[in-house]
């Protein structure tokens, strides 16, 4: 399967999980470069948005607290893009998403 990319522009989605991970450049793990990963749902599909930032936009505990109260934090993903490519097994797809920046869109209902 060929790689397919779809530009979404600026999009607001509810975030249900947040973590930090090492950044990979050309398949090589960078030991001193990290990115934030925001788990969202888009049309009932679980998608992880990777954003290169300092990890201080939101905390994992904050995201968990809002999700536990059934009012997930809505994040604005700027210049978002979804990338679909083939996985290792036939007939499987791998979905990745990236954004240039993530900003809290609303967080007034949680703790």
Image (cartoon, helix red, strand yellow):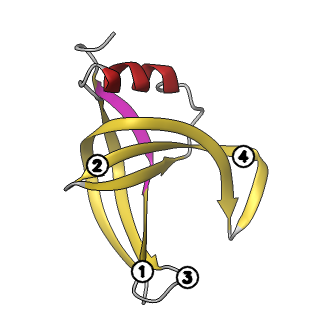
Say which label, 1 or 4, has the lower sequence index. 4
Q: CA distance from mark 2 to mark 4?
A: 26 Å
Residue 59 seen anywhere in this rendered image of the structure: no
Q: Which residue is mark 4?
A: 33
- Is disc 1 in contact with disc 3, using a CB cutoff of under 8 Å? yes
* Res. 73 in view: yes
Q: At 64% from the left edge and 45% from the top edge, which residue is drawn?
A: 21
Q: Position of residue 98 (x, y in %)?
A: 44, 55
Name the quadrant containing residue 65.
Answer: top left
Query: In the picture, residue 110 is in which quadrant?
Result: top left
> Does label 2 or label 3 sit earlier along the sequence?
2
Q: Could you classify mark 1 by the number of other residues whose Cα lies within 10 Å: few (under 14), some (14-19), or many (20 or more)?
A: few
Mark 2 in CB contact with mark 4 (< 8 angstroms): no
Estimate how packed mark 3 is, as few (under 14), some (14 to 19) or many (20 or more) residues with alpha carbons within 10 Å. Answer: few
Q: CA distance from mark 1 to mark 3?
A: 7 Å
Label 3 residue SS: loop
Q: Secondary structure at mark 4?
A: strand
Q: CA distance from mark 1 to mark 2?
A: 19 Å
Q: Which residue is mark 1?
A: 92
- Mark 4: few/some/many CA within 10 Å (<14, 14-19, 20+): some
Kindly indicate whether the residue at mark 3 contacts the one at mark 4 (C-beta within 8 angstroms).
no
Marks 1 and 4 sit apart, C-alpha to C-alpha, by: 29 Å
Which region of the structure is painted magenta? Answer: 98-105
Please state which of the two labelled residues, at mark 1 or mark 2, is closer to the viewer.
1
Q: Give the label on residue 41, or none.
A: 2
Which residue is identified by label 3?
88
- Return the x and y of residue 85 as percentages of the image width and height: 44, 78
Q: Residue at x 41, y 44 (%)?
A: 39
């Amino acid at each position: 399967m060929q790689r397919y990319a779809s530009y979404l522009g600026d999009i607001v989605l509810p975030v249900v999980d947040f973590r930090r991970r090492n950044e990979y450049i050309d398949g090589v793990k960078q030991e001193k470069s990290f990115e934030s990963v925001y788990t969202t749902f888009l049309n009932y599909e679980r998608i992880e948005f990777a954003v290169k930032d300092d990890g201080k936009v939101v905390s994992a505990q904050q995201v968990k607290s809002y999700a536990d109260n059934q009012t997930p934090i809505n994040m604005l993903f700027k210049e978002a893009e979804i990338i679909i490519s083939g996985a290792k097994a036939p007939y499987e797809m791998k979905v990745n998403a990236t954004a240039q920046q993530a900003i809290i869109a609303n967080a007034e209902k949680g703790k």
